[in-house]
Image (tube, rainbow, N blue to C red):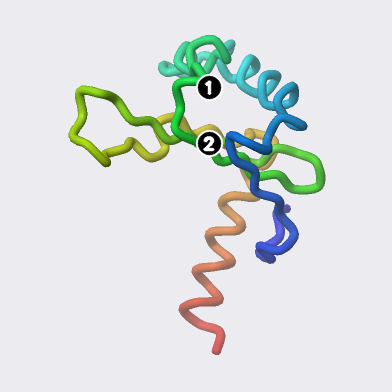
Amino acid sequence: MLPNDINQYQVFNKHNYLHYKEKLNLLLDEFSNSTDKLSSNYTPENIKFNSLDDITLIVYKGNIVAFASVLSRPIWPKNVSRIFNRLLRNKKFENSYQDLLRDSFFREKFVK
């Protein structure tokens, strides 16, 4: 299960994620070979990292938990970006996401 303590996670961006690039590519390859209807959007070739404004990579104990990207296009108005242009949650932690949300909701609503 993933912990609620944000201090136990590492967050990387486009400029400092390179240590995890190979792991990220493996995760993207795995998802791109799935039966998800958008899986072809997640190949490393189709993501085109060089054209992204930024990325967010969330890591827990050396494992990638999630990946997200930010993208701007010339056809969009100035200073407009698409947040979560691509969002991938590591399926290894699927139950943990639900537990995290449930636990956080419970604490916020009922624990004082």
Q: Is residue 88 left or right of residue 91?
A: left
As shown in the figure, which amino acid type bears the numbered disc 2? Ile
- Residue 43 x, y percent position in the rendering: 55, 13
Give the image quarter of residue 62. Answer: top right
Q: Residue at x 49, y 18 (%)?
A: 47
The circle drawn on residue 49 is: 1
- Residue 14 x, y percent position in the rendering: 58, 34
Local packing at callout 1 (Cα closer than 10 Å; few below 14, some 14-19, many 20+) is: some
Q: Residue at x 38, y 40 (%)?
A: 83
Q: Is 88 placed above or below 12 here?
A: above
Residue annotated with mark 2: 55
Q: Quadrant of the C terminus?
A: bottom right
Q: Is residue 29 left or right of residue 112?
A: right
Q: Residue at x 50, y 68 (%)?
A: 105
Real-space CA distance between mark 1 and mark 2, rounded to the nearest whole angstrom:
8 Å
For the residues labelled 1 and 2, say whether their Cβ atoms are less than 8 Å apart.
yes
N-terminal-most mark, 1 or 2: 1
Label 2 element class: strand
Q: Residue at x 62, y 36 (%)?
A: 15
As shown in the figure, which amino acid type bears the numbered disc 1? Phe
Label 1 element class: helix
Q: Is 79 placed above or below 31 here?
A: below
User: Which one is in front, 38 or 13?
Assistant: 13
- Residue 21 x, y percent position in the rendering: 70, 25
Q: Is residue 58 left or right of residue 22?
A: left
Q: Is residue 46 left or right of residue 63?
A: left
